Amino acid sequence: MQTDTVIFDMDGLLIDSEPLWEEAAAEVLQEFNIQLTTEQFHNTRGLRTEEWIAHWLHHFKKDLRFVNDAMEMIIKKATEKIDSHGTGMPGVQEIFALLKQHHYKIGLATSSPMAVVHVVAGKLNIGHYLQAMTSAQFLKFGKPHPEVYLACAAELQSSPIKCICFEDSFNGMIAAKAARMKCVVVPDQQMRHQPRWNAADLQLESLLNFGENELKLFH
């Protein structure tokens, strides 16, 4: 079935913000004497901040009463860091221009709060392309549940089976596939070799590698 809609994840895909989220999270976790490995950070990418911090506080047997305060502090720190230091990933402008040229509906579905979405849309100058922006912040479920992708498709008045999702995280890929959408993954360089990405419909090293030929695969 021919696709007519593309929905993008945000952090780590459109903007190089994952290191900034990790930096913010590490600063907050340090107050609990918790230090995560790079692999631990990677494995929990794509989760909402509240679920992320609850997971690690539970894992390290810390008091879960601190979840909300820790979540708010991580979001505050990350938003400030992204606003000051966030940079767009290679290929962002090119892929948005390509999709507009082919009259695709374009949306964004993220686990990040909407405040961060607006910061990123402004920094990357992509707001005029986006016909829907959805955040899992106040939804019942976050990724890897498909709710945020289904909500975005509904806002775009698109059938899920006519949607292509772009993701960089495993949890996001699972969410997209659970929504019955096609999924293109652009994993972090350190994670590209992992066989779990075989569940995606297409794997790329960069958004720059998605052009006319790749778009035809979904016609």
Image (cartoon, rainbow, N blue to C red):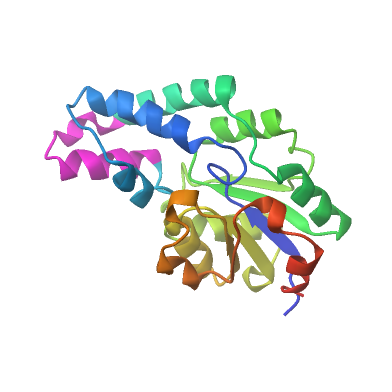
Q: Residue 83, image x and y in percent?
A: 58, 23
Q: Residue 52, image x and y in percent?
A: 33, 43
Q: Residue 86, image x and y in percent?
A: 58, 28
> Residue placed at 49% from the left, 50% from the top?
189
> Residue placed at 18% from the left, 26% from the top?
32
> In the shown orientation, is residue 27 left or right of residue 111?
left
Q: To which quarter of the image does residue 126 belong? A: top right
Q: Residue furthest bottom?
A: 1
Q: Examine the residues drawn in magenta and state their main secondary structure.
A: helix
> In the shown orientation, is residue 70 left or right of residue 209?
left
Which part of the image, by quadrant, shows the C terminus?
A: bottom right
Numbered label tally = 0
On the question of residue 64 being in view, the answer is yes
> Residue placed at 71% from the left, 46% from the top?
91
> In the shown orientation, is residue 58 left or right of residue 167?
left
**Front-most of residues 49 and 216:** 216
On the question of residue 143 being in view, the answer is no
Q: Residue furthest left?
A: 61
Q: To which quarter of the image does residue 92 belong? A: top right
User: Does the magenta portion include 131?
Assistant: no
User: Does the magenta portion include 57?
Assistant: yes
Which part of the image, by quadrant, shows the N terminus?
A: bottom right
As drawn, 84 above or below 172? above
As drawn, 136 above or below 212? above
Q: Residue 49, image x and y in percent?
A: 38, 39
Q: Which residues are magenta?
A: 49-69
**Front-most of residues 217 and 5:** 217
> Residue placed at 55% from the left, 32% from the top?
116
> In the shown orientation, is residue 100 left or right of residue 145?
right
Q: Residue furthest right?
A: 101
